[in-house]
């Protein structure tokens, strides 16, 4: 059985964000036979523009994103909610890895989504929009393993999410389900 390689994309650029910390918790929860890697540098990826996305063009941040996505067996997308929807940086990453349409790096690969916000809503709108965007892009969203975490200020305070046993268990389940889905694809 091959090792599963999961690329983690975080929709918040802030170093200390809860969503970044949830991504770190997911990396730590990787089961044996799986590697989760948080992609750094999404802030350097220009907004998707077909004038930039031409044969022979080389944009280092885009090349790094597409190479990492191409090597991935699956994706974990971790998103906050900005103004009731998906952050632009995460949507932009999905746009870049969806091209060329139908054969982009996300096409046919399993995807799980975790969302979190201070509101009781748990960034559910951003979660739903992320599921929609990555699904349209060709990713195979694992619907029954969704996780939305609300009330992050009260739940975590100044603590890292890895210090909350309930959240660690929930994140671990999402990661395990995603890795199982990637192994089906990898071993097929």
Image: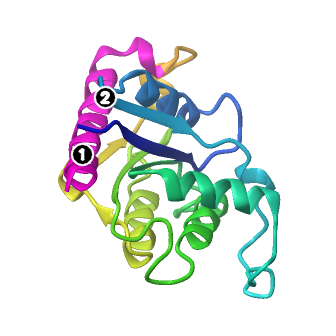
For the point 45% across and 72% down, which residue is it? 133
Q: In the picture, which quadrant includes the C terminus?
A: bottom left
For the point 58% across and 66% down, which residue is it? 91
Q: In the picture, which quadrant includes the N terminus?
A: top left
What kind of secondary structure does the magenta stretch mostly adopt?
A: helix
Vertical side of 116 occupied by 33: above or below: above
Image marks 2 and 1: residues in contact by CB distance under 8 Å: yes
Measured in 3D between alpha carbons, the distance from the residue under mark 2 to the one under mark 1, in whole angstroms, is: 9 Å
Q: Is residue 26 magenta?
A: no
How far from the left and from the top, in percent, is residue 60?
81, 58
How far from the left and from the top, in percent, is residue 67?
61, 56
Q: Is residue 165 magenta?
A: yes
Q: Nearer the viewer, residue 139 or 162?
A: 139
For the point 42% across and 12% down, which residue is it? 163
Magenta span covers which residues? 161-188
Q: Residue furthest bottom?
A: 51
Identify residue for label 1.
183
Query: Helix, strand or loop at disc 2?
Result: loop
Q: Nearer the viewer, residue 58 or 162?
A: 58
Q: Nearer the viewer, residue 177 or 88?
A: 177
151 sits left or right of 54 in the view = left
Query: Helix, strand or loop at disc 1?
Result: helix
Whichever of callouts 2 and 1 sits on the residue coming sooner in the sequence is: 2
186 sits left or right of 7 in the view = left
How far from the left and from the top, in percent, is residue 177?
22, 41
Label 2 crowd bin: few (<14), some (14–19), many (20+), radius 10 Å: few
The disc placed on residue 33 is: 2
Residue 55: quarter of image? bottom right
Q: Count the marks: how many? A: 2
């Amino acid at each position: 059985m091959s090792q599963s390689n999961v690329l983690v994309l975080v929709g918040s650029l802030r170093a200390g964000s809860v969503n970044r910390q949830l991504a770190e918790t997911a990396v730590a929860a990787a089961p044996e036979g799986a590697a989760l890697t948080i992609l750094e540098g999404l802030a350097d990826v220009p907004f998707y523009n077909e004038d930039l996305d031409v044969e022979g063009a080389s944009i280092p941040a885009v090349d790094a994103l597409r190479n990492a996505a191409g090597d991935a067996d699956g994706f974990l997308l971790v998103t906050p909610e900005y103004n009731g929807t998906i952050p632009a940086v995460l949507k932009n990453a999905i746009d870049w890895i969806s091209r060329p349409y139908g054969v982009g790096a996300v096409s046919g690969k399993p995807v799980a989504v975790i969302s979190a916000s201070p509101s009781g809503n748990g960034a559910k709108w951003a979660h739903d929009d992320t599921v929609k965007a990555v699904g349209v892009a060709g990713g195979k969203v694992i619907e029954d393993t969704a996780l939305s975490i609300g009330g992050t200020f009260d739940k975590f305070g100044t603590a890292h999410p890895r210090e909350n046993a309930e959240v660690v268990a929930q994140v671990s389940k999402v990661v395990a389900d995603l890795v199982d889905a990637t192994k089906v694809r990898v071993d097929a």
